[in-house]
Image (spheres, rainbow, N blue to C red):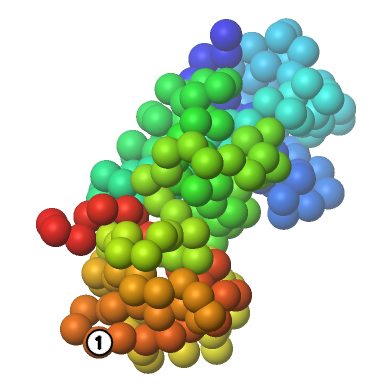
Amino acid sequence: MLSNKAEEILESLWVKLEEKKIPSATFEIMGLKKDDVSLKEIVSSGFCEIRSSALVFTDKGRKHGRDVVRRHRLAERLLADVLDVKGRLANEKACEFEHLLHAGIDDRICTLLGHPKLCPHGHDIPPGKCCARENKELKLVSPLSALSQGQGGKIAYIHTRDKAEMQKMMSIGVVPGMKIKMLQNFPSFLFKLGNSQFAVDESMAKEIFVRIGSEEE
Ligand SMILES: [Zn+2]
Ligand SMILES: [Zn+2]
């Protein structure tokens, strides 16, 4: 098993090389010294190789880095949407959590959260095997479109990067923390939001994620 520090190097390397597509992860860019203990650890365990003062992934290392990023971002969602931990504390805790959510557990958390695609900062969460299956398991957070009539909760987050759409939702009061309840799901989605009623189309209902059953809080 890798140390937490070594996992964090793999995580940061994955973000730099695979996501931001920087050409070369030199020690300087990585903020590492040649004799760093954790660096030696990831090289000797076969996760990375060193080529002209830069780190490159082995296949095993690339997969592991992606998994750590996935776990970190799932931990962020769990903290923000279910445990209501936000801000700096959330970031510290997400870093601790990612090391606890090991293989298998991350997919369960992902399922509970309704297979979120973005972390609270808007970064992609690399999908797991669970995300491909459409399952009916217990969920804590679910898209509005999947709720049954009478079911409700509080809006956890809105999954859209479209600014105009986000503004449109905010203008009708669709903001995280608002109480929402499904009144009718056919022929259109009608829901109660605070003290008013609104109808939305299916594509929008799929973008609004609700923390189920928290409406009485
Ligand atoms: Zn994030
Ligand atoms: Zn999933």
Tell me if I can see residue 155 in this picture.
no
Q: Residue furthest left?
A: 217
Quarter of the image holding residue 129?
top right
Residue 201's spot in the image, x, y percent? 55, 81
Question: Could you tell me which quadrant the N terminus lies in?
Answer: top right
Q: Is residue 133 left or right of residue 122?
A: right
Quarter of the image holding residue 11?
top right
Residue 133's spot in the image, x, y percent? 67, 40
At 38% from the left and 29% from the top, the residue drawn is 96
Q: Amino acid at mark 1?
A: Ser
Q: How many marks?
A: 1
Mark 1 within 8 Å of ligand 1, using the beta carbon: no
Which of the pair 59/56 is nearer the observer? 59
At 53% from the left and 80% from the top, the residue drawn is 187
SS at badge 1: strand
At 37% from the left and 45% from the top, the residue drawn is 140
Tell me if I can see residue 135 in this picture.
yes
Q: Would you place residue 214 above or below residue 54 in this image?
A: below
Q: Would you place residue 177 above or below residue 41 in this image?
A: below
Q: Would you place residue 132 above or below residue 56 in this image?
A: below
Residue 158's spot in the image, x, y percent? 46, 68
Q: Would you place residue 122 above or below residue 163 in this image?
A: above
Question: Could you tell me which quadrant the C terminus lies in?
Answer: bottom left
Q: Residue furthest right?
A: 51
Q: Is residue 185 left or right of residue 49?
A: left
At 40% from the left and 30% from the top, the residue drawn is 97
Which of the pair 116/114 is nearer the observer? 114
- Label 1 environment density (alpha carbons within 10 Å; few <14, some 14–19, many ≥20): few
Q: Is residue 43 left or right of residue 164?
A: right
Residue 145's spot in the image, x, y percent? 50, 66
Q: Name the residue carrying label 1.
A: 196
Which of the pair 196/164 is nearer the observer? 196
